[in-house]
């Protein structure tokens, strides 16, 4: 690789040809401020439209200032990142952005977590000289995401995630000039777009323009209602990220503290979605083996590969873009919905409570879960299996509002029977985890032998698309894994055109799987945070006494006492679902 | 400084004795490098306004190692006060095609596109008819080069070359980060020559007449002649081809109505020359460059209204991508309105001038960078009209 020498703020730097000034500067401890730039190197995501113009620097010999994020270094370049000319321009540009921004920081959902707010503080803006117009757009409410575009700074990060990474194409620039706004085509509402509610736009939005629908008040009301029994389930990825909201290092597991906090909040039963993940494996694993066996017996028209179905954004995606393939995904409901369904039948009977008097709350790293629990097929006579789904961020807010000092909490354990889970249930939280969990069980059910190694390391990693072949006692089982819907699209197209063959495929919509979900504490462009969370998930798995779903004794008990066996008629009724062709239709939302 | 007096020229529209196909036929008998040397020697600079040496542009693209290259004729003539390309395409389109074909031969491109301004769609039928004849003639000559027309949709910003590529590729018309320049990465990411309509006609004519004849016109920094779109307070509004290097004064003597107080040179994005600067300002790259628009204003005109119109135009036509342009244009517009209404003191004009200068150095593309030209020149020279 050709090396290039340059100086930035009088410091000599040597970089590879093709390196931007921004990256070169960071190598010598110069942190050039950015707003629109987003670089998730581990995912290959880069947003650098050179739009905000905050990162402009002076390059000797150049007439105008250069955006550091989008200008490559050249031999002998002399760069100044903090000259008077640069500082003046940068501050003026920031004032312009602020002049078109509602200054309602104190009541904004992103207060204290906003890149624009931090930038204004860092740059020492105390006055906005320019007092022109402010943009006004109508607010857009969907079941998961709120768009408040008055707060948009046109950084286009959301577009990069939606179009380049997810290939969903729900958001793009509409109109031009001062009227321009990022919106679905023809400025329609999100619900009329192919939006999957994955929430990756929310995860990267530098301001409060894109936020989640907040259900914390409904949860507080339910908790305060003496006639209701309120039970909570927590998804695996939450425990690996919640700590970040309380100043913990990324990757710190806070499972025990989280359970204690939930109990202090007043939930009657604190359960674990991981229990339902184990249940999912029983159903999905059995379904896989069923299809596989029929296929091996020479039966034609067996829908293979089987695709996982626990990610609701992924379900929305294929219903929109691949409706012709909707018989391929497993019919197993997601763990959130299996949990709700079992909670409002099996568990409700157990504690002799009527369905209507039970409130099921889920804590999810995900925004699409908010939409999923509102789907018609997941309710009985208008009573939803899961009443409210709140994000990791909303849980952190609830804990803070309840005056709970999270740091000082003691650890405690989940309640039973729906709080017990195997390590397999835990790894649902990261890419490759569901298929590894399924493999641990399917291997033993299929071969009738014990898999001594337990882990399937070959399924782990962070690459967008991964493939592995597992040896099921002489039978090669081909596995595909994708995280990110753009990668999922590639994988699906390779199946459609016949260039790839698999027996089973796991797909997660978000980068890294649920650990990178749209409802998690914001990563602010640091993909290292996602890697740390992934590590934490595997650590929790290793520490579990039980590592395989079918060895979870509460799951065994559930089948013995209630469901019969996997894929029984009762299981079908309560734990499976069907999919719709949404390629042409709008998503129908229920009004509260 | 070398100064010329106002002189009319007839190169662009002259058809007598000019057979564009023949010009191409002769050109493709020559070595490509010789054509480039001639083009560089002629001193021809881009006639769209930016004034980049055409020969160098061709040379850089020719030097790129790529199997696919493109020639694009920028016919997205959208600058307020400019209407010369419409006339050129209407009257001598074959000369434009010939310029493109010679360029294609020189740089090694097999496809050329004319990006036609959406509002000029009325020319489409005629142009396509002429194109099919021309394309057939090229085939007969054995030149592997085909021209197609690509229609714009009415956005000013798409006249900016990289936004034009985006538009052609079916995307939202927004300028790209530069570098890389089109000579390296243009349409579909391939090396591309993009020239203004008029530039391509001159390219054709330099091949027809030789560099010497072209070079004999104009000054050291501004060789040749240029087509001007003349409008405003003038008894002789219209399109004229004039030798470069004259002063604004000599221009006004010919085209003014005797009461000219200012000339806006280069359209809304250009600069405003007040009467007191007429004699000292040369029209050309060494003085005030222009894409051809010359708007004359007499004493009955309010320069506040002129500036207000321009700013309204930019506020609407900014692509929105970069902050300085998207918010800045609107701030300048609101700013002069507030001063006019007495809501801000005249001192606010200094803040606005500072803002305009920041836009010049920090905006992403030529649109945002050039708003300072009319703003600063009008405010500096007609301050009273802006305030009172």
Image (cartoon, coloured by chain):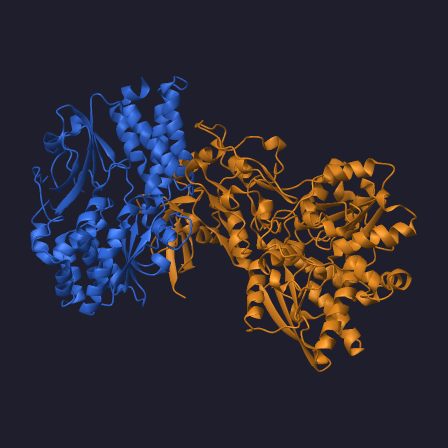
Chain colours: A orange, B blue
The picture places residue A60, in percent across and down from the top left corner, at 32, 47
**What quarter of the picture does the N terminus of chain A occupy?**
bottom left
Picture layout, residue A100 above or below residue B41? above
For this view, does A560 lie left or right of residue B252?
right
Picture layout, residue B100 above or below residue B272? below
Residue at the spot x=72%, y=75% of the render? A292
Pick the residue in front: B284 or B302: B302
Residue at the spot x=32%, y=59% of the render? B184
| Rendering quarter of residue A491 | bottom right
Pick the residue in front: B341 or B139: B139
The picture places residue A155, in percent across and down from the top left corner, at 49, 44
The picture places residue A64, in percent across and down from the top left corner, at 33, 43
Label count reads: 0
Picture layout, residue A233 above or below residue B63? above
Q: Is residue B118 visible?
A: yes
Q: Is residue A415 visible?
A: no
**What quarter of the picture does the C terminus of chain A occupy?**
top right
The picture places residue A411, in percent across and down from the top left corner, at 81, 49
| Rendering quarter of residue A293 | bottom right
For this view, does A227 lie left or right of residue B9?
right
Pick the residue in front: B205 or A514: B205
């Amino acid at each position: 690789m050709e090396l290039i020498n340059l100086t930035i703020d009088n410091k000599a730097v040597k970089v590879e040809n093709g390196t931007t000034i921004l990256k070169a500067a960071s190598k010598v401890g110069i942190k050039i401020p950015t707003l629109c730039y987003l670089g998730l190197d581990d995912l290959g995501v880069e947003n650098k439209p050179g739009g905000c113009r905050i990162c402009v620097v002076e390059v000797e010999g150049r007439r105008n200032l250069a955006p550091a994020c989008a200008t490559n270094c050249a031999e002998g370049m002399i760069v100044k990142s903090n000259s008077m000319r640069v500082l003046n321009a940068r501050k003026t540009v920031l004032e312009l952005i602020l002049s078109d921004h509602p200054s309602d920081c104190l009541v904004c959902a992103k207060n204290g977590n906003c890149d624009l707010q931090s930038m204004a503080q860092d740059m020492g803006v105390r006055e906005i000289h320019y007092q022109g117009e402010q943009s006004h757009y109508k607010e857009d409410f969907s079941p998961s995401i709120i768009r408040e575009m008055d707060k948009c700074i046109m950084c286009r990060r959301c577009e990069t995630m939606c179009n380049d990474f997810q290939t969903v194409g729900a958001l793009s620039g509409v109109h031009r000039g001062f009227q321009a706004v990022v919106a679905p085509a023809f400025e329609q509402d999100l619900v009329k777009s192919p939006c999957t509610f994955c929430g990756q736009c929310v995860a990267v939005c530098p301001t409060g323009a894109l936020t989640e629908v907040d259900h914390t008040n409904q949860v507080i009301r339910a908790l305060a209602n003496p006639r209701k029994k309120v039970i909570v389930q927590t998804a695996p990825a939450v425990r690996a990220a919640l700590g970040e909201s309380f100043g913990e290092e990324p990757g710190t597991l806070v499972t025990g503290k989280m359970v204690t906090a939930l109990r202090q909040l007043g939930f009657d039963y604190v359960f674990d979605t991981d229990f339902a993940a184990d249940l999912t494996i029983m159903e999905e694993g059995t379904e896989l083996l069923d299809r596989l066996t029929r296929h091996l017996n020479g039966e034609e028209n067996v829908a293979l590969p089987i695709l996982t179905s626990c990610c609701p954004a992924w379900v929305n995606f294929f219903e929109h873009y691949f409706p012709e393939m909707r018989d391929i995904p497993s019919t197993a409901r997601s763990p959130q919905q299996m949990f709700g369904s079992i909670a409002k039948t099996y568990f409700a009977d157990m504690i002799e409570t009527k369905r209507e008097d039970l409130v099921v709350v889920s804590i999810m790293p995900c925004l699409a879960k908010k939409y999923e629990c509102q789907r018609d097929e997941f309710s009985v006579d208008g009573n939803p299996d899961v009443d409210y789904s709140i994000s990791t961020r909303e849980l952190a807010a609830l804990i803070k509002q309840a005056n709970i000092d999270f740091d000082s909490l003691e650890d405690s354990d989940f309640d039973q029977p729906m709080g017990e889970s195997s390590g397999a249930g835990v790894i649902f939280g990261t890419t490759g985890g569901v298929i590894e969990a399924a493999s641990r069980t399917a291997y033993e059910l299929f071969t009738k032998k014990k898999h001594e190694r337990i882990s399937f390391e070959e399924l782990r990693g962070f690459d967008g698309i991964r493939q592995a072949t597992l040896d099921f006692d002489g039978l090669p089982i081909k596995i595909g894994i994708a995280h990110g819907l753009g990668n999922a699209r590639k994988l699906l197209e390779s199946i459609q055109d016949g260039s790839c063959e698999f027996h089973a495929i796991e797909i997660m919509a978000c980068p890294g799987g649920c650990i990178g979900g749209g409802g998690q504490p914001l990563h602010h462009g640091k993909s290292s945070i996602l890697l740390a969370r992934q590590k934490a998930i595997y650590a929790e798995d290793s520490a579990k006494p039980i590592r395989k779903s079918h060895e979870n004794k509460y799951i065994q008990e559930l089948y013995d006492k209630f469901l019969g066996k996997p894929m029984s008629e009762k299981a079908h009724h309560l734990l499976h679902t069907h999919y719709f062709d949404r390629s042409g239709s709008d998503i129908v939302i229920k009004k509260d | 400084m070398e100064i010329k007096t106002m002189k009319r020229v007839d190169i662009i529209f002259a058809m007598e004795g000019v057979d564009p196909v023949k010009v191409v036929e002769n050109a493709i008998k020559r070595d490509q490098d010789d054509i480039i040397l001639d083009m560089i020697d002629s001193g021809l600079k881009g006639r769209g306004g930016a004034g980049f040496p055409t020969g160098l542009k061709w040379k850089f693209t020719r030097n790129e190692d790529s199997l696919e290259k493109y020639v694009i004729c920028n016919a997205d003539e959208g600058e307020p006060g400019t209407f010369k390309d419409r006339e050129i395409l209407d009257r001598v389109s074959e000369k434009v095609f010939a310029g493109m074909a010679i360029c294609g031969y020189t740089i090694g491109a097999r496809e050329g596109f004319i990006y036609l301004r959406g509002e000029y769609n009325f020319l489409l039928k005629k142009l396509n008819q002429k194109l099919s004849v021309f394309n057939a003639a090229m085939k007969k000559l054995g030149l592997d080069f085909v021209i197609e027309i690509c229609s714009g949709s009415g956005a000013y910003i798409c006249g900016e070359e990289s936004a034009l590529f985006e538009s052609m590729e079916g995307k939202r018309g927004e300028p790209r980060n530069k570098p890389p320049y089109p000579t390296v990465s243009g349409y579909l990411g391939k090396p591309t020559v993009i020239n203004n309509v008029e530039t391509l006609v001159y390219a054709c004519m330099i091949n027809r007449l030789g560099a010497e004849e072209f070079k004999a016109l104009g000054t050291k920094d501004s060789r040749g002649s240029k087509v001007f779109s003349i409008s405003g307070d003038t008894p002789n509004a219209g399109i004229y081809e004039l030798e470069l290097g004259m002063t604004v004064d000599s221009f006004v003597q010919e085209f003014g109505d005797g009461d000219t107080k200012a000339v806006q040179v280069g359209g809304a994005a250009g600069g405003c020359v007040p009467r007191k600067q007429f004699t000292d300002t040369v029209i050309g790259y060494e003085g005030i460059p222009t894409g051809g628009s010359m708007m004359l204003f007499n004493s009955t005109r309010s320069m506040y209204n002129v500036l207000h119109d321009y700013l309204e135009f930019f506020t609407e036509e900014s692509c929105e991508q970069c902050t300085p342009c998207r918010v800045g244009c609107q701030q300048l517009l609101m700013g002069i309105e507030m001063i006019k209404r007495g809501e801000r003191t005249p001192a606010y004009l200094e803040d606005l001038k500072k803002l305009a200068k920041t836009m010049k150095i920090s905006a992403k593309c030529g649109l945002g960078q050039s708003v300072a030209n009319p703003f600063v020149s009008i405010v500096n020279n007609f301050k009273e009209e802006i305030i009172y």
